[in-house]
Image: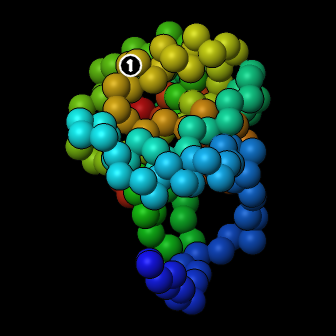
Amino acid sequence: MPLAATAALTVVYDSGDTRSIAPYIAVFDTDALNQMQQPSPMGQNEHSALVPEPVLQLPIRTPQVSPGPVDPQPLPLPAGVALPRPFFLVGADKLSRDWLALHRDRLIEIQAIGMLVDADTADDVAAIKAIANGLPILPASASDIVAPLQITHIPVLISERGIEQ
C-alpha cells in the first residue's frame, strides 16, 4: 500500500496577483485516477495518462498585443527575482508561425515554455502544436503577463537575457 507524503509549501515569489489555473486544466475523474494506478501495457507511454489535457476555450484573445516587430529590451524584474525558465508568446498569425518554425530548435535548447495567446479556431491551435512539435505550449490569454512587461507585439521570447524577438 503506497504511503502519502506531505511537505510544507515554500513560496519562492508571490506577486500578489495570483490567478487560478482551474480554467486551463482538465479535472481527472475517478476512472482516470484508477487507470493511472494500473500498470500500463508494453509500448505505451506511461506518462501520457498523468498529464491532463488543458480545457480549450476559444477564441483565445490577448487584446493588448498584435503581430509585429519587437525591439530587444531588458527584463524588468524586481531586484533578487530570477526568471525560473524562458517562455515565449505566439499567436496563430503568419508572423508567429514563421518565427516559431525558425526558432523552434533554440527554444527547445533553452527549455522554453510557450503560450498561444491569440487564436480563433481549434485548427489554429493544431497548426501551432504541429509547428512546435513537442515544445510545451499552453493556449491561454496573456493579458496579465504583457501589461506589466509592456509587451505590445508577438511573437516574443522572455528570458534572463531580456525581451526579444
Residue that appears at 61% across and 39% down: 54
Is there any visible trace of residue 72 in the rendered image? Answer: no
Quadrant showing the C terminus: top left
Q: Where is residue 147 drawn, in percent x and y?
A: 71, 47
Circle 1 SS class: helix
**Which x, y percent locates residue 52?**
55, 44
Q: Pick whichever, 56 or 119, lies toward us.
A: 56
Which residue is label 1 attached to?
131
> Can you say whether 135 is above or below 9 in the image?
above
Q: In the rendered image of this protein, does residue 24 appear above or below residue 33?
A: above
* Image coords of residue 63 (percent x, y): 76, 29
Which quadrant would the N terminus be assigned to in this image? bottom left
| Colouring rule applied to residues | rainbow
Looking at the picture, tell me which residue is in the foreground, 65 or 55. 55
Q: Nearer the viewer, residue 126 or 102?
A: 126
Q: Which residue appears at 48% of the width and 14% of the height?
A: 127
Instruction: Report the number of numbered marks.
Output: 1
Name the residue furthest bottom. Answer: 8
Q: Is residue 138 in view?
A: yes
- Look at the picture and state if 27 lies above or below 82: above
Q: Residue at x 54, y 54 (%)?
A: 34
In the figure, is residue 92 to the left or right of 146? left
Q: Amino acid at mark 1?
A: Ile
Q: Position of residue 130 (x, y in %)?
A: 40, 18
Residue at image position (53%, 86%) is 6
Left or right of 128 in this view: 92: right
Q: Quadrant of residue 134?
A: top left
Label 1: how many residues lie within 10 Å, few (<14), some (14-19) or many (20+)?
A: some
Left/right placement of residue 125 relative to residue 111 reads: right
Q: 152 or 32: nearer the eye? A: 32
* Vertical arrangement, residue 103 with respect to residue 95, above or below: below
